[in-house]
Image: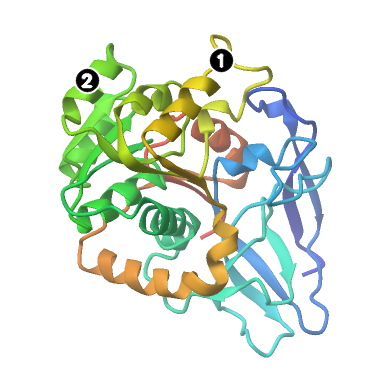
Amino acid sequence: MATLTNRRITLAARPEGLPEPRHFGLDTQPVPEPAEGQVLLQTLYLSIDPYMRNLMDPIGPGYASPVEIGAPMVGGTVSRVVASRNAQFRTGDLVLANAGWQDYALSDGSDLLALGDAAQPSQSLGGLGMPGFTAYVGLLDIGQPKPGETVVVAAATGAVGAIVGQIAKLKGARVVGIASGADKCRHAVEELGFDACLDRRAPDLAARLAAACPQGIDVYFENVGGEVFDTVLPLLNLHARVPVCGFIAHYNDSAPAPGPDRLPRLTATLLQKRVRMQGFIILDHYGERFDTFRREMAGWIAQGQVRLREDMVDGLENAPQALRRVLQGQNFGKTVVRVAE
């Protein structure tokens, strides 16, 4: 392995606002040799997720440390074991790992999940991985949709939102999505089975959402924030539930949002309508829920009850641009970078 090189995409500077190419670096290093108990992993697929933007800031979000300047960007991967000095893994094994934005990485095996002979291993970064798990836990534990209730989800064709809507339909709810563009809305209804989907870019979102939710909103899965949440807020029903896993509309903010203070209105709504609004970090739930989730989700996918769409990008060098697209809502489905065949 010493004759091979390991490409790494590193954090070169901390962005203020949307990351640009100058905020990333590309270096090469010798491929490391595994020590006793370690395995050497080759990255096949790299997950691109909105939380990565938070880790580029000097102060991390609390659930993970910020990426240091000069260090590789972090991220989930599907990797192949190319050398092993760990009895639990053999050369050639496919694993779910956290190798980050690089071709090769070492692991002691404690953070690896064997994938066996997965037909579509990249799905373990999407519907069968962290985004799908986020949708599953947030919707079922906090949202708790009941048959006949109305569930609204923004970024409806994204990695998390698409799964939220499909699980809600499985539980008998009426599902309204919000997405960017007519093509995404059509996909949500025709392919994912949503009852309706609204283009957030079209005029009069508030009026269209009210018309699409004549009985109000019982569950709003919050992963966007911004003007979408402002539109949802007055439509929340008594005892509505709002799981919060992200607020991507604000990840690139470098200053407080302009306009009036929204806090009094939010606080009044939470109180008067007895709304349950709860944030959650999916890292807290892996130990006790991930295996059950994987089994149930795999069954839904095999039976065609949950459909997955990937936004595949080729080449490690294109990971920075892929992250920019995700942060701007330009992806269509779960974004994955194919690093190696």
Cβ atoms under marks 1 and 2 closer than 8 Å: no
Observer-nearest of 38 and 187? 187
Mark 1 surroundings: few (<14), some (14-19) or many (≥20) residues within 10 A: few
Q: Position of residue 201 (x, y in %)?
A: 33, 18
- Judge left or right: residue 124 versus residue 305: right
The disc placed on residue 208 is: 2
Which image quadrant for residue 261?
Answer: top right
- Judged from the image, the secondary structure of the residue bearing numbered disc 2 is helix
Please provide percent x and percent y for residue 284: 59, 62
What's the distance in space between the residues labelled 1 and 2, CA to CA? 25 Å
Q: Where residue 73 sits: x, y (%)?
A: 71, 46
Rendering coords of residue 272 (x, y %): 39, 31
Q: Residue extending furthest bottom? A: 87
- Asked whether residue 328 is in view, the answer is no
Instruction: Please name the residue that numbered disc 1 is placed on.
Output: 261
3 over 316 or under it: above or below: below
Residue at 48% across / 75% down in the picture? 115
- Quadrant location of the N terminus in the rendered image: bottom right
